[in-house]
């Protein structure tokens, strides 16, 4: 299955709008077959969010808490910079770059978590 529509183009006007607004419409970048596959997966395998904060998936929980075994992936952090560099967009945060400098280090030992790591660490039963 093809993912990216190779005929999709970003114009100079698109780049300027992105630099100004921080938003770029990517309609048409993915092939419909891929979109249908993802939609089917979401419809069949992911439950609707709960209206109760403690239940279901929470983006807040993902960003505020750290698994005790999570390791810094420098390549993934740097990959988040690709669109920023391409569109000359500063972005809202540098957290992904500042949380750690060395690849493979335990995230929980980051200086950013000094003093409160106990409240951020998730444990398993």
Image (spheres, helix red, strand yellow):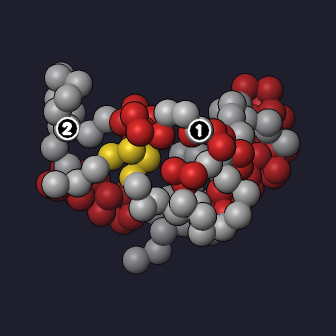
Camera-nearest residue between 9 and 76: 76
Number of other residues with Cα within 10 Å of mark 1, as a class: few under 14, some 14 to 19, many 20 or more: few
Q: Residue furthest bottom?
A: 1
Camera-nearest residue between 27 and 100: 100
Tag 2 secondary structure: loop
Q: Is residue 52 left or right of residue 18?
A: left
Q: Quadrant of the C terminus?
A: bottom left
Name the residue: 31% across, 35% down.
58
Q: Residue furthest front?
A: 115
Compared with 41, 91 (above or below) is: above
Q: Are marks 2 and 1 in contact (CB under 8 Å)?
A: no
Residue that numbered label 2 is attached to = 56
Name the residue: 66% across, 67% down.
103
Residue that numbered label 1 is attached to = 114
The picture places residue 59, in percent across and down from the top left corner, at 38, 36
The picture places residue 30, in percent across and down from the top left corner, at 50, 59
Residue 124 occupies which quadrant of the picture? bottom left
Q: Say if residue 32 shows up in the picture.
A: no
Q: Quadrant of the N terminus?
A: bottom left
Name the residue: 55% across, 34% down.
115
Q: Is residue 2 left or right of residue 6?
A: left
Number of other residues with Cα within 10 Å of mark 2, as a class: few under 14, some 14 to 19, many 20 or more: few
CA distance for labels 2 and 1 = 29 Å
Residue 11 - label: none
Camera-nearest residue between 62 and 81: 62
Tag 1 secondary structure: loop
N-terminal of the pair, mark 2 or mark 1, is 2
């Amino acid at each position: 299955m093809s993912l990216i529509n190779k005929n999709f183009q970003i114009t100079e006007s698109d780049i300027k709008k992105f630099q100004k607004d921080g938003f770029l419409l990517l309609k048409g970048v993915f092939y419909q077959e891929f979109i249908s596959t993802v939609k089917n997966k979401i419809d069949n395998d992911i439950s609707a969010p709960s209206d109760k904060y403690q239940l279901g998936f929470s983006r807040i929980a993902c960003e505020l808490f750290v698994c005790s075994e999570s390791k810094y992936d420098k390549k993934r952090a740097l990959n988040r910079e690709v669109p920023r560099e391409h569109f000359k967009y500063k972005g809202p945060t540098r957290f992904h770059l500042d949380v750690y400098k060395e690849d493979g280090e335990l995230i929980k030992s980051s200086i950013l978590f000094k003093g409160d790591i106990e409240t951020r660490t998730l444990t398993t039963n």
